Amino acid sequence: MFDSIGRGFKLILASIKMGWHDKRLMVPSIFTVISNIFFAILLFLQGKTAFGGKSETANQLMQQGHNLLNGQGNAQALTGLTGLNGPMDPTGMNMGVSSDSVLAVTGILCVWWLTNRFLEGVTTALVYSHLTEGKGSGKFSAAASAVFTSLPAIIMLGLVTLIAKRIAGWLRDKRGDGGLFGFGFNFMAGIIEVFWTLAGHLILPAIVIEGTSFWGALKRADKIAQGNLLTIGVGEVGVDLICRLTSYVVYLAGVLGFGVSYVAHLSLTSPLMFMTALIWGSMVLVVTALSIYIRAAFYTCLYVWAITAEEVEEAMRAEVAPPKPLAEALAH
């Protein structure tokens, strides 16, 4: 485990160095963070529209509650509160959410996901050009065009990924049955998650770089796995683990900071709190953008290594050098 983390840190430093030399590689990840903020605000506003504000129902609830507290018309007020489709209907049928709101939220989430995958694909295309053709070779217009052309395959990848996660989640829920079957379900869920994590990250480069369909990219990833073209597993370079832990530490620092300020009765509008919140927010943005970029760079390196090894005889594949960031991570 410690070796994996050590290699992960080496790869992160090498990827940051690569991005520093060609700063355009990290631009899509920065746009991803900005788009995440934008779509989060959209969801908040949509939620506020659906649930917030003083509606007639809220006014009725407040008035009837006032009558109850003052002993005025208790029976009628209680009936109005707890009756069918009343504000406190115990059957839960009155959710106050329209079908239009559900469609709006679903639409926002779908566009949000698609935007993130589009920008991840642009990062993949730029990193691939950097690794295979040299610094500054990738063009935003060409990368965006390649990803835009591949959108149907990327959407299909998202749908299949959602299904795979749902199946894995269902299997994990079944482990509560206990016994041998419970263990078997949990094991199968783990296999699906590990396989699709690797396959999914290999499928996206195949879609973007080679312009294949989803099924063509799936066959491509299967060929890479079956042909032992990847000489290492994802777990041997702990990039995902480091990125997750770093993100959790930064988020936890923010939560603890706000908790301490609340206990100490510090004013949230004070200059000190404003500067602290600004620094923490900047750290969140930087860590998130770097995590997105580093993951994309890592899996693109794996894909480039695999297709390079594919070009030589099987006996010679062990001698194929990985791309520079990965080579630095694996160096002893």
Image (spheres, rainbow, N blue to C red):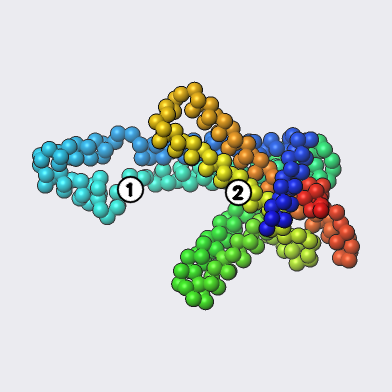
**Quarter-wise, where is residue 156 in the image?**
bottom right
Check the image and report above or below for 155 versus 55: below
Total number of numbered discs in the rendering:
2
> Crowding at label 1, few (<14), some or many (≥20) Cα neighbours within 10 Å?
few
Outermost residue, front direction?
264
Q: Is mark 1 on a helix, strand or loop?
A: loop
x and y, in percent, of residue 99 in the image: 39, 47
Q: Marks 2 and 1, Cα distance to the nearest angstrom?
A: 35 Å
- Front residue of 248 and 224: 248
x and y, in percent, of residue 70 in the image: 12, 38
Report the amino acid beneath label 2: Arg
Check the image and report above or below for 269 versus 207: above
128 vs 114, left or right, is right
Q: Which residue is drawn at the image coordinates 48% and 40% (left, top)?
A: 256
Check the image and report above or below for 151 versus 162: above
Q: Mark 1 points at which residue?
A: 95
Which of the image's four quarters has the N terminus? Answer: bottom right
291 vs 257, left or right, is right
Q: Mark 2 points at which residue?
A: 244
Q: Which residue is drawn at the image coordinates 85% and 54% (left, top)?
A: 321
